[in-house]
Amino acid sequence: EAEVAQSPRYKITEKSQAVAFWCDPISGHATLYWYRQILGQGPELLVQFQDESVVDDSQLPKDRFSAERLKGVDSTLKIQPAELGDSAMYLCASSWAMASGYEQYFGPGTRLTVT
Amino acid sequence: SQQGEEDPQALSIQEGENATMNCSYKTSINNLQWYRQNSGRGLVHLILIRSNEREKHSGRLRVTLDTSKKSSSLLITASRAADTASYFCATHNFGNEKLTFGTGTRLTIIP
């Protein structure tokens, strides 16, 4: 069964350093999402792509976070500089389309710890 | 921001019993979805119920939706140890194409 791939699975970094996460969605999925999940809470959407275009980044802290999906396939989320409050699980998900009837498929996540 | 609130926040039951968790939300929805998350892992889609549906079944899962009360419930029958996980409701709202997740219910099945 096809899966969403993410790497790395775990990342420990010092504050003020740069960090990057990678996501490879299920083949053929046009829509890709990055979520941040703080321990004990539900995922919160950071950015949503339709093919290579950003359709929602209203919750992305743009002073330090950036995301790209250059060829409309895999995607990278970057944080520079990392802050202590960025410690969280970063989840990538994909779906066939943006339309509301489609379920989202999640990757295993990247657990980020900022020290 | 979180749209939904799950209740209870945590639930422990004996294996074989039924587990019920509830979700309340604030704004009109297109559909509501339930997801399961095992500890430290990604989320897995369980079931989707549309705003014009009142009840839906999938295996041991039964979901109800009451749009007049802006609430949904997830029932897991004949629970198993493997059902131990966090369960999240997520709403798909009119006017945008994103899911908004609730705060989750942590379910523990005691063997």
Image (cartoon, coloured by chain):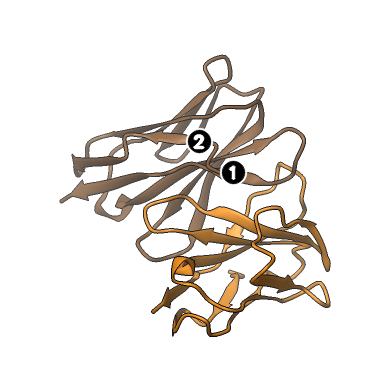
Which numbered tag is attached to residue B4?
Answer: 2
Sequence-wise, the earlier of marks 1 and 2 is: 2
Q: Residue B106 at x, y = what percent?
A: 32, 47
Q: Are marks 1 and 2 in one subunit?
A: yes
Residue A2, by quadrant, is bottom right
**What residue appears at the point 55 percent right and 68 percent down from the top-left corner?**
A107
Give the quadrant of the C terminus of chain A: bottom left
Of all residues, the one furthest to the top in this rendering is: B68
Q: Residue A81 at x, y = what percent?
A: 58, 78
Position of A111 relative to B43 (above/below)? below
Dot 2, how many residues are within 10 Å of its Cα: few (below 14), some (14-19), or many (20+)? many
Q: In the image, is B26 to the left or to the right of A96?
A: left
Chain letter, colour orange: A
- The reply to whether discs 1 and 2 touch (Cβ–Cβ < 8 Å) is yes
**What residue appears at the point 37 percent right and 53 percent down from the top-left corner?**
A40
> Can you identify the residue that label 1 sits on?
B100
